[in-house]
Image: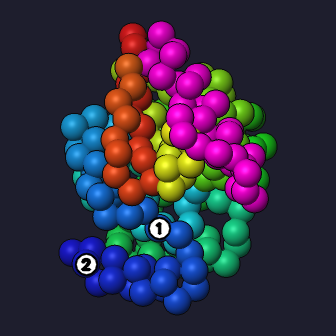
Amino acid sequence: MFEDIYRFQKKYAAEHKVPVMLDDSMAILQETVRRARPKKILEIGTAIGYSGIKMLEQADCATLTTVDKDADRLDVARECFKKAGLADRVTIWEGDSDEIVRYASGKFDFIMLDGPKGQYARYLPYLKELLSEGGVLFADDVTFKCKTGEDFNPLHKLRTISVQLKVFLDELTNDKDFETTLYDVGDGVSVSVKKG
């Protein structure tokens, strides 16, 4: 049902240099959503709605609240959600995810983090508070082209992002309130279940 929309999104993303989740990472996201069966999903980083539609396809009773600050991309996302027949299940918050994450309220049973990579560590305490017990925090691009490993030499322009992702992974994997699994696909994926 959604194949035409996915083809359009992939083509649009390639032509306009919009990052969308890599296929291997997407397969893990879809399987994680399918198993978790969430009712309320929060997505940080809407882009053009590709991963949002993929998640809603796997959780047919879920609603999605998605956040992005790029108005042009959000216009494309709105149109894609509408064409997919999902617009009534989606709430779009346009703005800086830093502000929205800090002031959001309520509980979500699935959070998909694919926003500004250098902010993941700062977002973690807020996302933890927004996540219900037993909920899943899925984070994409956590190794950012393998620049966070032990052999990483941070002498390059993306040093801050890479260092912050390492901080995020250290905090996440050492947090006793989460059970975290790391997947070595794409630019790295983490799946963390909040203990109840």
Image point 42% across, 79% down: which residue? Answer: 9
User: Is any part of residue 70 visible from this angle?
Assistant: yes
Magenta-tinted stretch? 150-178
**Can you identify the residue that label 2 sits on?**
3
The correct choice, above or below, for 170 with respect to 76 in the image is above
Q: Is residue 75 magenta?
A: no
Q: Is residue 172 magenta?
A: yes
**Residue 129 disc label:** none
In the image, what residue type sits under mark 2?
Answer: Glu
User: Is any part of residue 78 visible from this angle?
Assistant: no
- The answer to whether residue 133 is left or right of residue 45 is left
Label 2 environment density (alpha carbons within 10 Å; few <14, some 14–19, many ≥20):
few
Image point 40% across, 80% down: which residue? Answer: 10
Residue 45 or residue 67, whichever sits in front: 45
The image position of residue 24, as x and y in percent, is 29, 58
In the image, what residue type sits under mark 1?
Answer: Val
**Residue 20 disc label:** 1
Image point 53% across, 69% down: which residue? Answer: 19
Disc nearer the start of the sequence (2/1) = 2
